[in-house]
Amino acid sequence: MTQTTRTKSRPLPRLWIRPLLRRLDPYVPGEQPKIRGLIKLNTNENPYPPSGRVLAAIKAATDGRLRLYPNPTAQALREKLARLHRCKPENIIVGNGSDELLAMAVRCFVEPASRGVQRVQALVQFFAPSYSLYPVLAQIHGAVANPVPLDPDFALPGLPELKRGKQYNFNAALTFITTPNAPSGRGYRTGQLQEICQAQRGLVVLDEAYVDFADENALSLSLKYPHVLVARTFSKAYSLCFQRVGYLVGHAELISVLDKIRDSYNVNGLGQVAALATLDELAYYRANFRRIIATREQTSSQLSELGFQVLPSQTNFILARPPIDSAKNWLRKLRNRKILVRWFDQPSIRDYLRITVGTPQEAQALVKAVKTELS
Ligand SMILES: *Cc1c(COP(=O)(O)O)cnc(C)c1O
């Protein structure tokens, strides 16, 4: 690679960068600080490592084969996922994390807003608060974001309520529903999701990033309705954030359209190896889900006893409204005690902290820090 000398940075000519991107507010991921001894409860990572066999499979694949391109369609992984979900490989597309697939869905199914394009065709709809990536994806694409407020207790509005309200659009080109929801942690009933899907004329993506920590999942809807896709990821429940593997399940025709715009080698080889090995170790992961759920329930009740208003969670994190001081100050106070949680500067959740469920030891440290602050 040639060395370039960078002189003093001067502003570049404005015409080099699209106006849309000059205006863009990018997605802000949680911090990944390298502070020794920090308890990291801010990005919903799994506190337990991948299974030993998964680590061994990754190590075994790290040899001269790294010079080769990986399988372009993640064929073996799609076959194994198809057996797991009782569908065909044609119903599955694998992505470089599910984030890539959410972006591809916008690019496949939503028109950029422009003259001559009906507003509904350019509409990316989602509930608010939910995953803060969706409005960014809409903005990048030049589409129109339609955030529909959840009920004040973060429940999903019922179908009659959505029909009565002015905001929700049953013809929106694409509707994202995070289920269970983030950052509220609330679970939605499959029956209610089905009602919404049935009434929806545009496409629906059910983003099930946290579903392994929930009581029910809605995967069946993606195999029953041609306009419903379900997004899953190996990141959260399967301790593989680092490897970036996610997938969508849905009608073969939708999947084949997504496949048309997919980067040829979008899923790296070690990620495919890791995900394949993970599917052989489901018992190990299911035991971890149970542990995380037990820690979640215990931490929720301990924080409630300390005056936090804790929302019931179906995920691996808790949304809690701290007592006495503002959530923003609590974020700082806990950080000073080497515990990192997440706070969102958004009207509906400004008073809350989102706390990832860690190991029982990490949860104990959190409760202890809270007690010390309160005493
Ligand atoms: C973490 C997360 C994702 C993205 O997961 P990756 O597979 O790591 O890209 C998608 N949706 C929601 C709601 C998430 O919280």
Image (cartoon, rainbow, N blue to C red):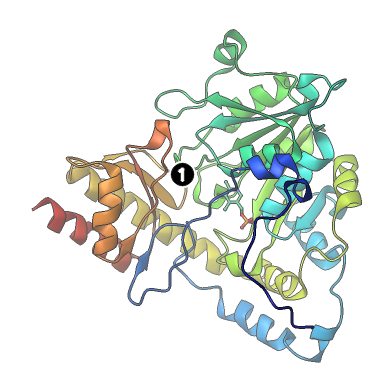
Q: Judge left or right: residue 102 versus residue 307.
A: right
Residue 329 appears at what percent x and percent y? 25, 48
Please state which of residues 162 and 125 is positioned toward the viewer in this rendering.
125
Residue named by callout 1 = 314
Residue 270 appears at what percent x and percent y? 72, 76
Please state which of residues 336 and 153 is positioned toward the viewer in this rendering.
336
Going 88% across and 20% down the picture, which residue do you hit?
116
Name above or below for residue 328 compared with residue 33: above
Residue 70 appears at what percent x and percent y? 84, 74
The image quarter containing residue 320 is top left
Q: Quadrant where the N terminus lies?
A: bottom right
Q: Judge left or right: residue 3 versus residue 328.
A: right
Furthest residue to the top?
164
Identify the secondary structure beneath mark 1.
loop
Residue 249 visible, this orientation: no
Residue 241 appears at what percent x and percent y? 59, 64
The image quarter containing residue 292 is bottom left
Q: Judge left or right: residue 62 versus residue 329.
A: right
